[in-house]
Every structure is written in structure tokens, then in C-alpha cells.
Image (cartoon, rainbow, N blue to C red):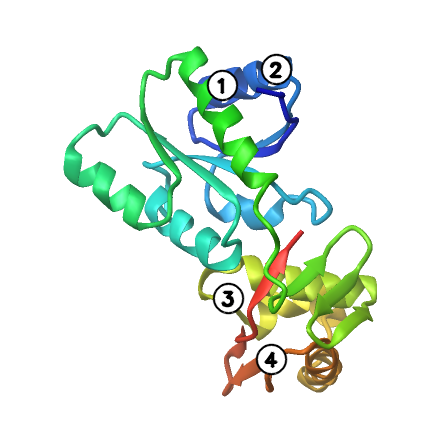
Amino acid sequence: MQKIALKILVVEDSDALREATVAFLQSHGHYVRSVASAEEVNDVEGSFVPDLYIIDLILPAEDGVSLTRRLRATHPSVGIVITTALSRIGDKVLGYRSGADLYLTKPLDPEELIASLESLAARLHSTPSMSDALTLQVSNMRLCGPGGEVPLSAGEATVLSALARAPGRSLERWQLAEVIGGEGQNLPSAATLEMRITRLRKKLTAAGAPPPGIKAIHKVGYTLCAPLLLT
């Protein structure tokens, strides 16, 4: 089987295990980054869009099952491998039903991990894209869909990416304001934020998304309601 280099994000709260996993995967030619919690997944640089996630089940705050569910909802074709010491059949069933491709129990056998990733890589690189789905091409800031390709500004691409990655695909106003940039009194006003969201709605519609694309949550924030894949 031909080896395919993957972009992999490791989500593991054990510093020693996380660093060892990253080093091992890099030694096999993969491009790897890592975070210690589910919340940090949203902080990964926007241009690094993982092909595959390796997720510890027991994480601080948001757990691996919850993270798997929201990643699967946002990235239907991404690879997800759960790694955990929990080996009960009920835990495995929950992991698979949450959207995991593989459920591997710790301690991991390095050869089993590599063989699993090679098998997943073949599937990931042979899965055709959905012709009717909207896709945000993060690196070149283009929104593609049934209506065509629509160029985005760097700020627009960042906002869409943040909404797509967020739990429930929703962000409060202050969170979006921080995504756009600024702090304290320099944060954009509610009116400025709404103006930017309005422009994004128009671009989502132009690319083929059913309106409104982004729904306002009264006095709270915004929810991305258009189907959107990140590449």
C-alpha cells in the first residue's frame, strides 16, 4: 500500500504521551500538530486543516466523545481515531456512534496505529467530494458551492472557519468580536459585527447556500446553519 502523508492533529492531555505520539507520527512522514484539550482545537492555525484527528477520550472540560460529534458534523469526511484506556464494549459503541472511524485502546501498539492510519489514509484520499456541499478553502480564502466560487477576505474566512469549528457551530458576539480582532475598547461594535455577518450571508447565498446561511441568536450571537466543509 502506498504511504500517504497526512495532516494529523493529536488531542491528548498527557504531555508525555502527546509529545511521544507526535514524534512517532512525524518519523513516519506525517505533518503533525497537537493540543492538550478540545477547546484548543479551535486555536489551531486556520491554514492547517487536519485530514485526521487522534483524540483521547478522557479530556478536561469537553470530552473526546463531544469533540468527535462536533468534528464529524463539521467535517463529514475527516478521519477520527479515538484512543483511550476505556475498553468496555459500551464505551466502544458510544465512540463509534459519535462518529469515530477507529477506537483504539491504550497502551497503543505503534505498528497497529500506523497500519490503522494507512488504511484510513487510503479511504480519505479516495472519497469524492460532495458536489452539492459548500466548501471553504481555507488556504486560498475561497467559498465553493453549487452557485460557484466566491472570494473571501481574510477576516471573512476566519469568521466562517471559527463558526464551523465551534461547538454547535455557534459563537457569542464577544467571541466573534475577538475572532475578528481587537481587544477591550477596540473590539468591533454590535453594528459593525452585524454588517460583516450580512456580507458573509450574501456570499454564502452566492455560493449556493440556502438563506439565511448564518442565523442571529437574539442578544447572544450567531449560528452557522449552512452546510460547510473545511479543506
The kind of residue tagged 3 is Arg
The kind of residue tagged 1 is Ile
The kind of residue tagged 4 is Gly
To which residue does mark 1 refer? 114
Please name which of the two marks, 3 or 4, marks the residue nearer to the observer.
4
Instruction: Name the residue located 72 percent from the left edge and 70 percent from the top edge.
Output: 187
Instruction: Name the residue located 74 percent from the left edge and 81 percent from the top edge.
Output: 206
Compared with 124, 98 (above or below) is below
Name the mark on residue 169. 3
Q: Is residue 22 left or right of residue 81?
A: right
Q: CA distance from mark 2 to mark 3?
A: 34 Å
Instruction: Name the residue located 55 percent from the left edge and 69 percent from the top edge.
Output: 227
The kind of residue tagged 2 is His
Res. 182 visible in picture: no
Q: CA distance from mark 3 to mark 4?
A: 12 Å
Please name which of the two marks, 4 or 1, marks the residue nearer to the observer.
1
To which residue does mark 2 refer? 28
